[in-house]
Image (spheres, grey):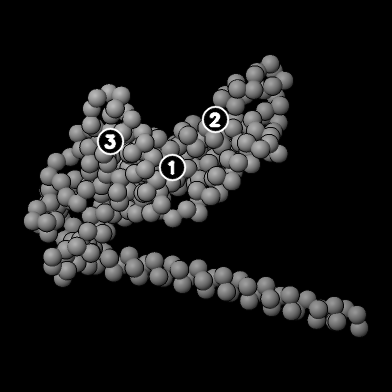
Amino acid sequence: MSAPFANLKTIPRRLVGAFAVGVAATAAVAVLGLMLGMLTDIVIKGAPHTTWSFLTEFPRNSNMEGGIFPALAGTTLLVMLMTVLGVPVGTATAVYLSEYARQSSSLARMVRFAVNTLAGVPSIVFALFGVGFFIQFIGKRIDAFTGSSAFGDGSLLWCSATLAVLTLPVVIVSVEEALRAVPRELREASLALGATKWQTVWKVVIPNATSGILTGSILAVGRGAGEVAAILFVGVTYSSEVLPGAVTDKFMHLGYHLLVLSTQSPDVEAALPLQYATTIVLLALTFFLNFAAIFIRSRLRKA
C-alpha cells in the first residue's frame, strides 16, 4: 500500500513541473511572436524605401528628402569611439575588482555600489552629466588651457564618452564574471613558476577571459548603438550636409534622426516611410556591429 501512495505524492510535483515548463514555453513563444511580428511590420513598410540612394545621399528639405548617409556614418563612428573609450576602462575596473581588491575593502564596496547605481540611472541623466561634466567642466578647461574653442561644445567625442560611462556597468559585470570563471589552478601554477601577480593577470588570466571581455563589448555595442536620450544635449545635431571631420565636430545619429522624423516632421504621413526605412537601417547596423564582434570572439576562441 505504501508504494501507490508514494506515487500519488509525486503526481502534484510532476504536474507543477509540467505547468511551469508550459508557462515558460508559452512566454518564450509569445515574446518570439511579438518580435517577429514587429520586425515583419517594419520590413514590409520600410523595405521599399531602403534604396541605395537613401543610404548614400545627404538629407535635404528638413530631412524629408535625400538620404541618411551622415547619420549612418555618425552612428558607426560613435559606437566605435564609445567602445574604444569604455571597454578598456571597464576591463581595468573588472580586473581590479576580481584580481586585486579584497572583497571586504571599502574601496571595492564603493566601486560596486557605483556600478550598481550607474546601472539604474535613466539615460537622460547621463545626457545632463555629459553636458555638465564633459562639456562644461572638462571641455571648457581644455579650451581655456589651449586657447581654442573646439572642446567646450557638444561633439562626437563627448557623446562617445557619455555612452562609454553609460555602458560601463555592462562591461564591468560581464568581464568580472569572465575573470572569475578562469580556474584558480592556472593562477596558482603561474605564481608557482615565479611569475608576478601582474604577469599572471596579463599572460594567463586575461587571455583565458578574452571571450568574456568581447562579450562585454558586444553588450556595450548593443546598448549604446540605439541610445538617443543619453546624447540629446551632448553633440548630436538635427541635420548635416557634411561628415564629421574630427572628434570635436557635431554629427548626425540614426536614433536621433528617427526621433526628429517622428516628432518634428512638417508632414507626418510623408515621413512615415522614412521612419520605417531608418529603423531598418538602425537595426541592420546594430546587428552588423554585434555580428562583427561575435565573429572576432569566435575566431579568438579557435586560435
Identify the residue at image location x=17%, y=69%: 268
Q: Are marks 1 and 3 in contact (CB under 8 Å)?
A: no
Q: Is residue 205 left or right of residue 256?
A: right
Point out the residue furthest to the right here. 1
Q: Give the amino acid at mark 2.
A: Pro
Mark 3 or 2 closer to N-term? 3
Residue 181 in view in this figure: no
Check the image and report above or below for 1 versus 132. below
- The mark found on residue 165 in the picture is 1
Q: Is residue 159 left or right of residue 56?
A: right
- The mark found on residue 119 in the picture is none
Residue toward you, 145 or 243 = 145
Identify the residue at image location x=30%, y=24%: 145
Can you identify the residue that label 3 sits on? 152
Secondary structure state at the residue bearing disc 3? loop
Check the image and report above or below for 193 versus 154. above
Label 1 and label 3: CA atoms lie apart by 19 Å
Label 1 and label 2: CA atoms lie apart by 25 Å
- The mark found on residue 207 in the picture is 2
Secondary structure state at the residue bearing disc 1? helix
Identify the residue at image location x=16%, y=63%: 265
Label 3 and label 2: CA atoms lie apart by 39 Å
Mark 1 or 2 closer to N-term? 1
Q: Nearer the viewer, mark 1 or mark 2?
A: 1
Identify the residue at image location x=32%, y=39%: 135
Residue 68 locus on image (x, y percent)? 18, 51
Image quadrant assignment for residue 191: top right
Residue 3 locus on image (x, y percent)? 88, 78
